[in-house]
Amino acid sequence: MAIDIHWIRDDVSLAQHCAEWQRLPYVALDTEFMRVDTFYPIAGLLQICDGARVYLLDPLLIQDWTAFTALLEDPAVIKVLHACSEDLEVFLRLTGSLPVPLFDTQLAAAYLNLGFSMGYSRLVQAVLGIDLPKGETRSDWLQRPLSQTQISYAAEDALHLAEVFEALRPKLSAEKTAWLLEDGAELVVNLRREIDPDEVYREAKLAWKLSPAQLAVLRELCAWREREARARNQPRNRIIRENSLWPLARTQPDNLVALARIDDMHPKTVRQDGEFILTLIKQVAATPASEWPQALPEPLPMEAAALLKELRAIGQREAERLDMAPELMLRKKTLEALLKSGYPNGPYQLPESLRGWRRELMGQALLDSLAAQPQEEQA
């Protein structure tokens, strides 16, 4: 199949095309990038399909992304992507903006109960009956010239994305389309919400087992690691490996030999940042107790599992009624946050993470189910 491919390699051409695309109801977008040893993705290629032609944008040559930003933010043009969290990072890094409204075909498949978290090739096969060639995903997208195989792979992806959108969209009710776009907007909001380095420690494995004094060390180590990863543009694990954080906070070594013995500690970290890490630990250990974070709540006990199952069943019933993938309904983290708000005897509060249509549809049912639990069962 011959695809009509157009290259865009300069600012003027990009601006002209963006003006044309802004007159369309939708554009399908895809990106190819490299992220081997950097914190931020490096864009290698951007693909746009208007439903008929595919345009390949060269981010190594284009300097001015103003017109493209206007297209991304144009509320009248739907931006179609698939499983787009990394693509969003590429757009944000390259242009400083993010696509709205956003229609994610992976989510659309779940709303139509075709499958949850479907990979792109599987979705194209299920919807269009086309088998996509694999093989170029991991290739070097920063090399120039790109190989013919890379070019057709990238163009084909964008073209089929538009075809999948045109096949799925008519099958979605107005209600489901609105919910899908709401989920897309949520993805964008979450990505815009810059991670606060001082809050990262809350997500660290086993952090709840540490005392407030140890947590103070973990908080500073996690915050420093996050800031350094961004500043050096290196993956977090290049700064300090994930598995070293907890033992560092727990044992608080005071010399390089003890530091080097920490679980999973990379010798390069000891050489490059060892003295700094030891100083940081020492400084935090000297802070007054009033500045330590509070102990983190323990995970829910095993006995809560049955309750969790009952709450999940509420989502499953709604999914069956609406013919949607059950995984779309209630996230495990949300249900755990709900239980933690009042376990074992209540009162319970709906967590902030339960928003929009999910809250309207299932919020009250969740609270009613918890209120109906016999007290002794929960004790």
Image: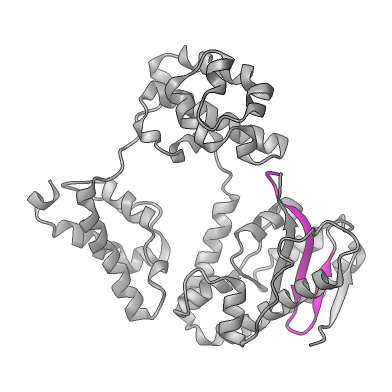
Q: Residue at x 61, y 63 (%)?
A: 84
Q: Main secondary structure of the magenta part?
A: strand
- Give the position of the N terminus as an image quadrant: bottom right
Place of residue 97 in the rendered image (x, y in percent of width and height, measured from the top left)? 69, 56
Is residue 5 shown left or right of residue 98? right
Q: Is residue 40 magenta?
A: yes
Chain part drawn in magenta: 38-57
Quarter of the image for residue 87 reads bottom right
Q: Residue at x 19, y 57 (%)?
A: 370
Q: Is residue 25 visible?
A: no
Q: Residue at x 71, y 57 (%)?
A: 91
Q: Is residue 89 magenta?
A: no
- Give the position of the C terminus as an image quadrant: top left
Q: Decide which of 154, 59 is in the foreground and name it.
A: 154
Place of residue 21 in the rendered image (x, y in percent of width and height, measured from the top left)? 77, 75
Quarter of the image for residue 318 reads bottom left
Place of residue 4 in the rendered image (x, y in percent of width and height, measured from the top left)? 84, 83
Place of residue 116 in the rendered image (x, y in percent of width and height, measured from the top left)? 47, 71
Is residue 253 shown left or right of residue 188? left
Q: Decide which of 320, 264 is in the foreground and name it.
A: 264
